[in-house]
């Protein structure tokens, strides 16, 4: 199991983004729904590595979260609410989010190889613009020509934006990160 805990960066100076983030992550069909645990922090759980990767990318795009993922067992029966959960994955998620705060990048506890890949992906995503995120998301389901037509831009612009945003590298790394999480 994978427990993801996120804590909003500089929440005292910024609007509350917990509702937006929990809506986005709950759309990914978690095993244990994402909900606010305390203050500006929320938590939930997945049982699939690819869902964890999708959640990580969604939160990295929002650019306002300390993100920690704990890999391990969750005490059963599963609680009704994530804030009631316990077990190694929950404790690892707590350690990971604290490390994320210190290192200022997402952290995974319990899967060192996955952490290494996430660190590289995060470095490639640092500084990605809103436009690069938008076009990379469209490229998951549309061709470059279709994106160009949809956005009324030149196909070469689509290609340039995808290259600058490291879309190909991120797309290739996603299944690797998911496999490393699953095998931990």
Image (cartoon, helix red, strand yellow):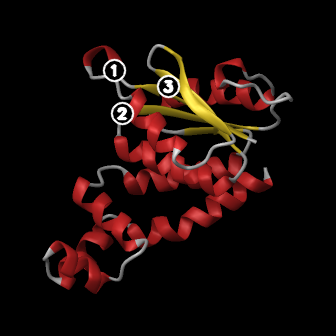
> In the structure shown, which secondary structural element does the residue marked by tag 1 occupy?
loop
Q: Which residue is mark 3?
A: 102
N-terminal label among 1 and 3 = 1
Q: Is residue 58 left or right of residue 110?
A: left
Q: Which residue is mark 1?
A: 10
Q: Are marks 1 and 2 in contact (CB under 8 Å)?
A: yes
Q: Residue at x 55, y 51 (%)?
A: 118
Q: Is residue 168 left or right of residue 157?
A: right
Residue at the limit of the structure toward the right, as seen here: 76
Question: Is disc 2 surrounded by few (<14), some (14 to 19) or many (20+) residues within 10 Å?
Answer: some
The residues bearing labels 1 and 3 have C-alpha atoms spaced at a distance of 14 Å
Q: Is residue 139 left or right of residue 74?
A: left
Residue 88, image x, y percentages: 80, 28
Residue 170, image x, y percentages: 47, 64
Q: Nearer the viewer, mark 3 or mark 2?
A: 2
Residue 140 got which mark? Answer: none
């Amino acid at each position: 199991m994978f427990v993801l805990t996120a804590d909003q960066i500089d929440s005292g100076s910024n609007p509350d983004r917990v509702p937006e983030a929990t809506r986005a992550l709950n759309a990914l069909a978690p095993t244990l729904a994402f909900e606010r645990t305390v203050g500006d922090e929320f938590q939930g759980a997945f049982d699939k590595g690819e869902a964890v990767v999708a959640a990580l990318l969604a939160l990295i795009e929002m650019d306002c979260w300390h993100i920690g993922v704990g890999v391990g067992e969750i005490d059963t029966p599963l609680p009704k609410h994530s804030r009631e959960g316990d077990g190694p994955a929950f404790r690892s998620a707590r350690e990971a989010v604290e490390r994320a705060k210190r290192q200022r990048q997402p952290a995974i506890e319990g899967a060192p190889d996955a952490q290494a890949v996430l660190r590289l992906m995060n470095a490639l995503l640092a500084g990605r613009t809103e436009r690069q995120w938008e076009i990379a998301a469209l490229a998951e389901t549309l061709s470059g020509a279709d994106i160009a037509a949809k956005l009324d831009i030149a196909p070469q612009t689509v290609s340039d934006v995808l290259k600058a945003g490291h879309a190909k590298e991120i797309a290739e790394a996603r299944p690797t990160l998911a496999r490393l999480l699953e095998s931990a």
